[in-house]
Amino acid sequence: MAIGEICNREVVIVQRDTTIQEAAKLMRSHHVGALVVVKEVAGKRHPVGLVTDRDLVIEVLAPELDASVITVGDIMLPKPVTVPETTGVFEAIQFMRDKAVRRLPVVDGQGALIGIVALDDLLSLLADELSELSTLVTREQKKEMDSRH
């Protein structure tokens, strides 16, 4: 299964000049822990950064900086790790592990943003798959027991 099939296509995006205060409000209203910073190129949005709730705390709140002046461009992780939409789910998981990231913007063949996948999304997917396998084992055991009695 390709990551493009399961990624969340409703990505909350911001521009570099969005203030931290505005970013925090977006995270709160959309119930997300990360925003993808984008730049428009030929009418398409390309990821140029990523800012997380942790970034807000570590970079702005803890040092008591002015969240109404600092922008996401000031603190974002530049050049975010992205994956093409055709990447397999397990390959994406390996990529996340190797790059030590919890969130991956998903891009099309031209590098335009089409979605995002988070560690939580993948854990949920894998839990569902494991549940299906567990059900298979139980059914197989029941089928065997029924056929032998």
Image (spheres, rainbow, N blue to C red):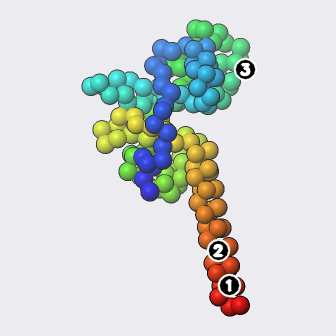
Is residue 14 visible in the rendered image? The answer is yes
Drawn side of residue 80 relative to residue 120, left or right: left
Q: How many numbered discs sit on the rendered protein?
A: 3
Which residue is farthest bottom? 148
The part of the image, by quadrant, that contains residue 148 is bottom right
The residue indicated by pointer 1 is: 146
Q: Which mark is residue 139?
A: 2
Establish if 86 lies above or below 140: above
Residue 50 location, x and y as percent?
A: 51, 30
Residue 59 location, x and y as percent?
A: 64, 22
- Mark found first going from the N terminus, 2 or 1: 2
Q: Residue at x 61, y 22 (%)?
A: 29
Residue 136 location, x and y as percent?
A: 61, 71
Q: Residue at x 52, y 42 (%)?
A: 117
User: What secondary structure is marked by label 3?
Assistant: loop
The residue indicated by pointer 3 is: 62
- As shown in the figure, which amino acid type bears the numbered disc 2? Arg
